[in-house]
Image: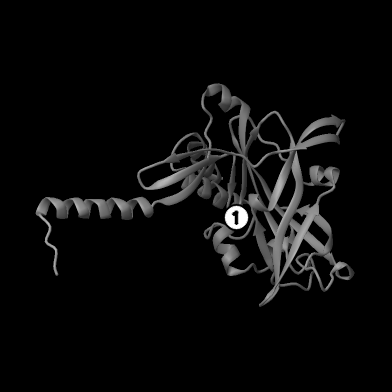
Amino acid sequence: MKIKFSNRVSLSIISFLISFIVFNCKTLETRLLDPANSAEEKEQTLVGFLLLDDEKSDAKASATLEVTVQALDASNFSINMVTEKEGDKVKDAVPMPSEILYHEEEELSYVTYSKFIKNTFAGFVLDSNKEYYIGRMSWSRYCGDRCKTLLNLSLEPQISYDTLKIKGKPGEIVFLGVYMINAIQDKESKSFFSNKVKIKPEFEKIEKDSPIWNKKFPNYIQSHLFDSESGINEKSAEIKFLLNIINVQKKGYWKEKAEKRLNELLKS
């Protein structure tokens, strides 16, 4: 038996179906929270950097022509805020919460506002008067088709602070560079019952004159982490970081700051 609907009922059903489809096809986005006023602009800074995992622990070796690396983002580590120093020595610090501030619904998306971004670059909105450093790191390495090793470590505070002091400038975006973590595994610590291993981390910045820049990087790393027209170097990574901020933010204070800094870089 066929059921006939009036034109009005049919249009109502169609409208409902369209609304249902659109409602359920909204994208999920995460954006950085912009300063609320001029006072916050002077207090906040957006700090970014790129952290690479030297998966084979051979990136610095002269015999290595092609490096095997993966990028670690803000979901792979936590940062600590320095609360007490004696000269240049860190005496005390507190972990920074990975806070999600609030959600907002837009016409085509659901937007989460936060003070950090989770993508291939680490980006944090921080107090420009404070100093920070990486405290803990946790990420995975694939060791075969059906094998995955979990790496979990705490960095020694002073070494982490001396290597990568996370500090920006009031109201500005600061890119701190490209860094590499070399996690040397203690094979004797791995057991049949667990895929967790003890590791001895080596953490350092890839300086602008480092021979690592002259080596071949995986294609997906080149396309996702560096600007295609600027080669493989720190400036290229900063350009890509700024382009990511512009794409993520869509509008507002940090987008405008990223556009300004990008124009400065492209002219230099």
Residue toward you, 78 or 256? 78
Amino acid type at image mark 1:
Thr
Residue toward you, 156 or 114? 114
Colour scheme of the picture: one colour
Q: Position of residue 217 (x, y in %)?
A: 64, 67
How many labels, in total? Answer: 1
Q: Is residue 165 visible?
A: no
Where, by quadrant of the figure, is residue 18 drawn? bottom left
Identified at 68% across, 65% down, the residue is: 69
Residue toward you, 72 or 109? 109
Identified at 41% across, 41% down, the residue is: 105
- Label 1, residues with CA under 10 Å away: few <14, some 14-19, many ≥20: many
Left or right of 211 in this view: 216: left
Residue toward you, 185 or 191? 191
Which residue is situated farthest in the bottom direction here?
Answer: 145
Q: Is residue 106 visible?
A: yes
The quadrant of the picture occupied by the N terminus is bottom left
- Tell me if residue 53 comes above or below residue 255 in the rendering: below
Q: Secondary structure at mark 1?
A: loop
Q: Position of residue 29 (x, y in %)?
A: 48, 48
Which residue is situated farthest in the top direction here?
Answer: 39
- Give the residue number, with chain letter if any, for mark 1: 120
Q: Position of residue 38 (x, y in %)?
A: 53, 23
Left or right of 7 in this view: 253: right
- Tell me if residue 103 comes above or below residue 197 in the rendering: above
Where, by quadrant of the figure, is residue 88 drawn? top right
The quadrant of the picture occupied by the C terminus is top right
Q: Position of residue 44 (x, y in %)?
A: 61, 30
- Tell me if residue 267 comes above or below residue 37 in the rendering: below
